[in-house]
Image (cartoon, rainbow, N blue to C red):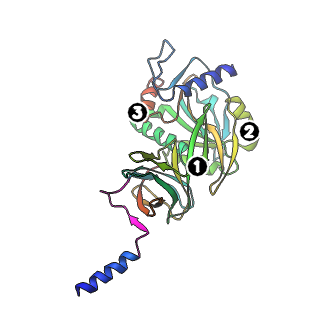
Amino acid sequence: MMSLWRAIRILSFAVGSTVLAACSEKLPPLHGVVFDPADAAPPLRIARVNGTPFDLAAEKGHVVLLYFGYTHCPDICPATLSDWAKAKRTLGKRAEQVRFVFVSVDPERDTPAVSAAYTTQFDSTFIGLTATVADLATLAGNWHFAVMKEETGTANGYGMSHPAQSYVIDREGRVQMLFPPATRADDIASDLRHFIK
Amino acid sequence: MKKLLVIAALFIGAGTVSCVRVDREASPVRGAWARAADSAATTAAYFTYVNRDTITVEITSWSSPDAASVELHQTMVMDGMAHMLPTTALPVIEPGDSLVLTPGAQHLMVIGLKRRVAAGDSVTLVIATSRGRSLRFGAQVRAP
């Protein structure tokens, strides 16, 4: 299972943002990278800023677009969320069927309030969460990535390595697709239409 | 009177020789923009520097009166993981080539903004080149 994830992930970045035909017979060619078969999403349960939990397992019936990043990342993280916001605007009312979820992997600097405020800069409905120090290793293990603090010696402090892709979890709670970084907003919107009603 | 004006112009000129405000027609800098961010936060700035000269140009430093410091960084994606590292080598731009700073690749980290910058604002950037002059230009701020 893990080796399959890794192999597909490596493949997805080898092709970059080029169009990859969907493997699934049910789906037309899409811009993102499709998993076939799609596996159940790993657990993700994190307290929101108001203390109530965000539980991915409870989001069945919604499509979830998920990204792991950190708020001190001024480049790829805001670029991704900015593209999400454009895609959401393109989807219009149908975007109500999608949860846009940003999870910070930098609990040292990103309190739940910081993550929540950060995401609402892009769209007021975006959900910003922070994995706790205690939960981070388990979360990263479940989602098959390694978070690392990178001391870069810059005035901005340390950096964090984090997954570059966005995950698409379908209404049945399966990880259906990845959007590589720099996937165009129109392409994100176009692909999401296949997963919402 | 004419002589006085010439002398005055020379004085004014002498005070500004080290910093050239970029005029759009002749500017080697194109499409400068930055992302909106709060005061004290870090944002990223992007632009393209086109070397139309006949000799190689090196960007030797970058700064902003609107921020505590500015650094050149590179986002890299390896095995699906994003990393961001400072670029230590100075950018060298051959004649006819361009330095392109763009999201997900090389970008200027504008660290410690002295004020909140919102869409429609401008962040001033100053880059020095090996030609012995500085270019001062505004990066248009876009919504995050």
Q: Bounds of the magenta span?
A: B15-28
Label 2 sits on what residue type? Asp
Dot 2 lies on which element? helix
Give the residue displayed 72% in from the left and 39% down from the top. Answer: A136
Is label 3 or label 1 in front?
1
Label 1, label 2: how many angstroms apart (C-alpha)?
A: 32 Å
Side of B7 relative to B113 (left or right) = left
Q: Are the residues at dot 2 and dot 3 in contact (C-beta closer than 8 Å)?
A: no
> Can residue B84 be seen at all in this image of the molecule?
yes
When the figure is inspected, residue B17 is found, relative to residue B82, above or below; the finding is below
Q: Are the residues at dot 3 and dot 1 in contact (C-beta closer than 8 Å)?
A: no
> Of the numbered discs in the image, which one, if any, rests on residue A135?
2
> Of the numbered discs in the image, which one, if any, rests on residue A186?
3
Is label 2 or label 3 in front?
3
* Marked residue chain, label 1: B
The mark total stands at: 3
* Marked residue chain, label 2: A
The verdict on a common chain for dots 1 and 2 is no
Residue on which disc 1 sits: B87
Residue sitting at the far top:
A25
Label 1 sits on what residue type? Thr
Q: Is residue B41 magenta?
A: no
Side of A74 relative to B14 (left or right) = right
| x and y, in percent, of residue B90 in the image | 54, 52
* Marked residue chain, label 3: A
**Pointer 1: residues within 10 angstroms few (<14), some, or many (20+)?**
some
When the figure is inspected, residue B82 is found, relative to residue B61, above or below; the finding is above
> Of the numbered discs in the image, which one, if any, rests on residue A145?
none
**Pointer 2: residues within 10 angstroms few (<14), some, or many (20+)?**
some
Q: Earlier in the sequence, mark 2 or mark 3?
A: 2
